[in-house]
Amino acid sequence: MPENKLPLTFYLRDDVTQIARELLGKRLVTLKDGVLTAGIIVETEAYGGITDRASHAFNGLHSARTRVLYSQGGIAYVYFIYGMHYMLNVVTGKEGVPDAVLIRAIEPQTGVEAMLERRNMKKLQPALTNGPAKLTRALGIDLEWNGYPFTGNKLWIEDFKREVRESEIVSGPRIGVDYAGVDARRPWRFWIKENPFVSKTRS
DNA sequence: AACATGATAAACT
DNA sequence: GTTTATCATGTTC
């Protein structure tokens, strides 16, 4: 177990955009079937609870799907979309506040062979993990991981000796949320400037 | 009916 | 190499 694993207190803070920024440069790790896979987080998006039209919990919606969003921070919110993809979010804030950060891209670091196999690819290239559904597939994350804690021994985020200067962090509108009206234009997507593993925007 | 996407193919430059 | 179009596939409200 790594000593630099982020503590629960990291996730319990109430500024979700700040947490989304701080997650850049951190190392996301999964341990599944004895196989360790990990990568550096290079792109995130903040989802601001009940007042954010792009959030699944907008207007205080409670449902079977959004239940884990209202939990105390420090657990995973995994959901299924477009009939075939899984998305990983980090739930933040105190219990009752459905804030979350979507992990949109990572830079592969450990267990590249296993990731390539899960993705059915032969060679390391940005397409391995440069999108939210690509990285969940590469890390072996599916619906079973919904609600799983980031403080356990199967899924965690750890500090990594990668200094991310403020000047390296770029922000802009979130992807795929055009339906969200005014909230669609909020600059709540954060990424590391010029990193080749950041997702490609569709025009 | 819509969806916090990815893979592929075809037509560009 | 890049942009544009199309489809896959099933849960959610």
Image (spheres, coloured by chain):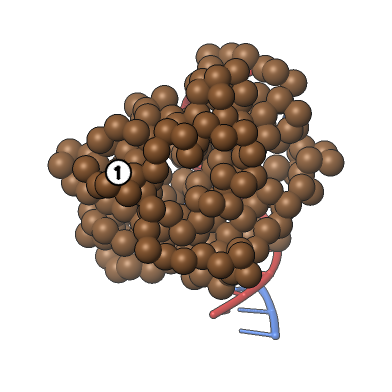
Chain colours: A brown, B blue, C red
**Residue A166 shows up from this direction:** yes
The x, y position of residue A33, in whole percent, is 17, 38
Q: Quadrant of the C terminus of chain A?
A: bottom right
Q: Quadrant of the N terminus of chain A?
A: top left
Tell which subunit mark 1 falls on: A
The x, y position of residue A52, in whole percent, is 73, 33
- Residue A158, above or below A169: above
Query: Could you say which is closer to the camera, residue A114 or residue A167?
Result: A167
Query: Could you say which is closer to the camera, residue A35 or residue A142?
Result: A35
Outermost residue on the right side: it is A182
For label 1, the residue is A30
Q: Quadrant of residue A110?
A: bottom left
- Residue A149, above or below A122: above
- Residue A36, above or below A56: below
Q: Residues within 10 Å of mark 1 (few under 14, many from 20)?
A: many
- Residue A193, above or below A108: below
Q: Residue at x 41, y 50 (%)?
A: A135
The x, y position of residue A148, in whole percent, is 37, 28
Q: Quadrant of residue A30?
A: top left
Please state which amino acid type lies under the numbered disc 1.
Answer: Thr
The x, y position of residue A2, in whole percent, is 25, 47
Q: Residue at x 51, y 20 (%)?
A: A71
**Residue A106 shows up from this direction:** no
Q: Residue at x 63, y 60 (%)?
A: A201
Q: Residue at x 27, y 36 (%)?
A: A154
Q: How many marks?
A: 1
Outermost residue on the top side: it is A63
Relative placement, left or right, of A35 versus A29 is left
Relative placement, left or right, of A105 versus A177 is left
Question: At numbered mark 1, what does the secondary structure look like: helix, strand or loop?
Answer: strand
Relative placement, left or right, of A17 versus A117 is right
